[in-house]
Image: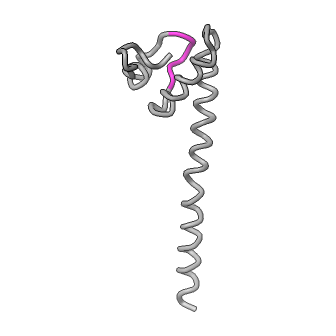
Amino acid sequence: MKLVIPTLLLISFLLASSLLPTTFAGLSKGFCDSKCKDRCAKAGVLDRCLKYCAICCSECKCVPSGTYGNKHQCPCYRDKKSSKGSSKCP
């Protein structure tokens, strides 16, 4: 009887911890989707802008405000470079 409560606590902890990454991944994706949609609203090539913005957002966990500039708000986003040395993030 003394082992029942600790065993139940252990099982509930394991179940709860296995659900956490899925929950946070959903929040992060929704965050990036909405921020990148705003950021790319005036982009000439929308699908390319959304693709690279999503990559940068997932790595940096932030997207500058507005549709252009303001990269000082997110140094990681600002400092990402393509293989050619140009800015990777829109």
Outermost residue, front direction? Answer: 84
Q: Residue at x 55, y 80 (%)?
A: 7
Q: Nearer the viewer, residue 65 or 87?
A: 87
How far across and down, in percent of the image, does residue 57 sit? 51, 29
- In reply to whether residue 13 is colored magenta, the answer given is no
Q: Which residues are magenta?
A: 63-68
Q: Residue at x 43, y 23 (%)?
A: 77
Above or below 68: residue 58 = below
Above or below 61: residue 15 = below
60 with respect to 18 (left or right): left
How far across and down, in percent of the image, does residue 13 sit? 55, 67
How far across and down, in percent of the image, does residue 48 sit? 58, 18
Above or below 1: residue 31 = above
Q: Quadrant of residue 72?
A: top left
Q: Main secondary structure of the magenta part?
A: loop
Q: Residue at x 55, y 28 (%)?
A: 54
52 with respect to 30 (left or right): left
Count of picture labels:
0
Above or below 14: residue 24 = above
Q: Nearer the viewer, residue 1 or 40?
A: 40
15 with respect to 64 (left or right): right
Q: Quadrant of residue 33?
A: top right
- In reply to whether residue 65 is colored magenta, the answer given is yes
60 with respect to 44 (left or right): left
Q: Quadrant of the N terminus?
A: bottom right
How far across and down, in percent of the image, does residue 4 sit? 58, 85
